[in-house]
Structure formats: C-alpha cells, structure tokens
Image: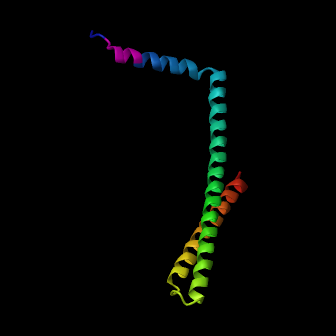
Amino acid sequence: MGQISTLQKAGIISRVAGRQLGRSRWLRAGFSAARITLEHFGRVLRLLWLQIAGVFFLFFALAGSVAAWREYGRWQAGKMGPGRMILALCFALVFAWYGVSSFWRAGRKTDRG
C-alpha cells in the first residue's frame, strides 16, 4: 500500500472535524445567529447607503437648480442664449430624479421588511 500524503491527511482530519462540529447544537445555533445578524446588518447598511446617496443627489439637484436660475437671469438679460440654462435644468432634473428614486427604493425595502 502507498503512503498517505500530508494533504490527504489534512483533508481527512478536516472532514472528520466538520462532521463532529456539525453535530453540535450550540455551534449550529451560533452559526445561525451570526448569519441572521449579518443579514440584518447588511440590510440596514443597504438602506443607509440608499439614503446617503439620495441626500447627495438632492444636493446636486439643488446646486443645478441654482445654476439654472442664475443662467435664466443671464438669458433674460440678453447676455447669452438658452443653452446653458437648459443644460443646468436638465442636470438638476436628472439628479432630483435620482435622489427621489433613491429614497423611494429605501422606503420600498423597509416596507418589505
């Protein structure tokens, strides 16, 4: 018969140890508790991320709105055409949509539990 390599011995020992640990109710309960806790923390972190992103998007929308208002004044004064005002307004609308939809998605995730 041939000799068993060290790697094969380690594999056998790990399988036996895994079977023995799988029989322990305390260990299974601990793993289950850790899994549930990590899932809940992950859910909370996803909601927090959506809300923080929503605040930043709404801040950018506000900045775009201020720029659009400033460009509107320049356009009305005849200093320039409407292109920059339209661009700033589109920027503000896009980021306002992203901000509102981010809060909306966070609200849907909390409704589902």
- Residue 109 position, x and y percent, is 67, 55
Q: Examine the residues drawn in magenta and state their main secondary structure.
A: helix
- Residue 78 position, x and y percent, is 55, 90
Tell which of 26 and 88 is nearer to you: 88
Q: Is residue 20 left or right of residue 43?
A: left
Tell which of 73 and 86 is nearer to you: 73
Residue furthest left in the image: 2
Residue 76 position (above or below residue 2): below
- Residue 92 position, x and y percent, is 59, 72
Q: Quadrant of residue 21?
A: top right
Q: Residue at x 54, y 81 (%)?
A: 86
Q: Quadrant of residue 95?
A: bottom right
Q: Residue at x 65, y 59 (%)?
A: 55
Residues in magenta, as a range: 4-10
Residue 37 position (above or below residue 55): above
Q: Residue at x 32, y 12 (%)?
A: 4
Q: Within the magenta stretch, is there residue 24?
A: no
**Colour mapping used in the image:** rainbow
Residue 81 position (above or below residue 5): below
Q: Number of callouts in the render?
A: 0
Q: Residue at x 64, y 69 (%)?
A: 62
- Residue 69 position, x and y percent, is 62, 79
Where the N terminus falls, by quadrant?
top left
Tell which of 50 and 107 is nearer to you: 50
Q: Within the magenta stretch, is there residue 5?
A: yes
